[in-house]
Image (cartoon, grey):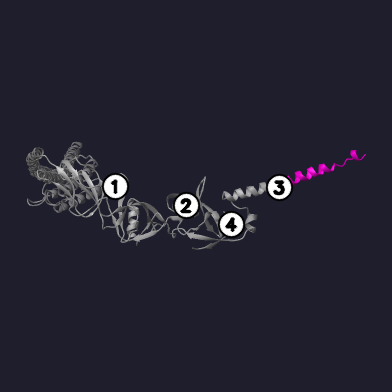
Amino acid sequence: MRFFSHKAPWYTKIRRNTWFRWGMVLTLGGVGLGLALNLMRGEEVPQKVIEEQTVKKLEVLEFGMWKPTSSREVLGTVQSSGDLDITAEVTGTLQKVLVDIGDKVEEGQILARFDLVGDRTQVAYENARRNLNATQQSSQNTIRAAEIAVESAERELQQTLEQEEQDRRKVFEELRVNADNAMTKAQQALDWSDRIVGATTRFRSEQDADRRHIGRTNRVLRQSTKNEALRLFRSKDQLPIPPGMGESPLRMIPYAQARIHYTQEIRALISQMDTLVRGTTITQTFSRADRDSFEASSEALATAIDTQLLTLETKTQAARSEKETNRTTIISAQNRLKNAEAQLELQQSNAGLQISRAQNEVWLANTSQQDLLIRAPFAGLITDKSVSSFDQVKVGDQLFSLVAGDVTPKVVAFVTPSERDRLQSASEIILELSDKRQITTKNIQLSFKTGTKNQKQKLELLFEEFPNIPMGTFVKILVPADGLREDLLPLSAFAFEPGGAEVLILKDGKAQRKQILYGDIFSNAVEVLEGLEKGDQVIRHRNRAFSGELIESLHP
């Protein structure tokens, strides 16, 4: 009966307990793993965990105040500071080369001897003389052509000045005539208005009944027109006078502009007179034919004034344009003269250089007719030999390299302009050798010419006491970091996540994630472009804290 009991066998209980225990282990492990992954990804720590954690003490930097302390390494090469390349000064065949690489030589010692054939050197000498004569003749022709170009440019400038002066005076004279014509027409219109409204006493002796009828039904407009005619009559004497013979023609522009404005006011007066005429009532003593006659007169005056205004405005604009055109034309002629003079100077310089080279070739050719020896310019060590006996060489070919024996080595490197500036501003330059030894110097020589291939500049460091290391050895020059930047943070403050770079900032006592946009990386420093404001508190070591943790600031 025991085998048929409803209770489970003992081995069944063991299996159940085992599965239960494994299930608990996997559940707790999954929760722990999920929390760990959240922490590794920088996600927020659950509030319950935050409440249980302790306050961390971490180094915090103020953005905008941190300065990098590391140095950038630039590779340099140890070279001799007394190298000299000995080149051929004549063209010919070497009869004998008397030294080899590694030989020590004294100042004046013979290094090689030329084998010169009389006929060949004589031909070279005659050719050099003929070349000198041809160069001199060609230079004279080139210089004369440049001088002719200068003379032609001078004549052209003088002709341009005279022609432009004539054109300018013609334009301004036409402007004066049109301004006077406009004033004549304006005066006719003003006199016609004055006869009708009686603005002045000039025409009171002229009795005309028809004129007295105009404006009787609109006395306010008649009085306003009368006042305006009187004002215009008085303001005529205030207009500027034309420039005199010794004055600049440019004064004609304001002279004409003032008459344009005055004529426009007369045109407005005629419009008022036309309104006054058209508003006059027809009576037995003032017929429609009388009114039509006055209307025709006002229209004729208005048309004549409009024509004069249009002509005067066109001429005024032409005078302004002529002023600018005149100036541009003269400047162009002056520039052509300057260019011709510069070309003459260039041709003279080139001619002098070519003649000097030709004279030098003649001297070298004459010298080559004698036994010519190549001698050491100073005592030293032969470090390179590019020729052997019976080799043919020409002027400028490298023959030997000589290193003085009493000079110290130097370090040669190529640096960027920014590295150059930092090295110049440094109190001393640190050099690190292959065995990690460091030496310093203040003696720095820089070439400010940037190379076209690498866009860098040559740097030479000279040392009073330099270790005994072979020439050609590579060493490291430690370039100080740029301490003037305010947008840098240490590399340790950054986390480069799939969604972008970020740092942890300290805010209200807690670590908070902050996504930023970064730029260049300089050794252990990173350039911050966007995301931080000056004064933000940044945790120096990003991997020592998580977002949401309580942090106590430790300033460096």
The residue labelled by disc 4 is 549
* Left or right: residue 498 compared with residue 264: right
Above/below status of 209 relative to 48: above
Residue 295: % across, % down:
19, 39
Query: Label 3 vs label 1: CA separation?
Result: 68 Å
> Which secondary structure lies at badge 1?
loop
Mark 2, Cα crowd under 10 Å, few <14 / some 14-19 / many 20+, is few
Residue 277 visible from this viewpoint: yes
Report the amino acid beneath label 4.
Glu
- SS label for mark 4: loop
Tell me, for residue 25, which label it has, or none. Answer: 3
Q: Nearer the viewer, residue 245 or 495?
A: 495
- The mark nearer the N terminus, 3 or 1, is 3
First in sequence: mark 3 vs mark 4: 3
Badge 1 is on which residue? Answer: 451
- Asked if the residue under mark 4 is in contact with the one under mark 2, i.e. CB atoms within 8 Å, the reply is no
**Which portion, as a residue range, is magenta?**
1-23
Q: Nearer the viewer, mark 3 or mark 4?
A: 3
Image depth: mark 1 or mark 2 in front? 1
The dominant secondary structure in magenta is: helix
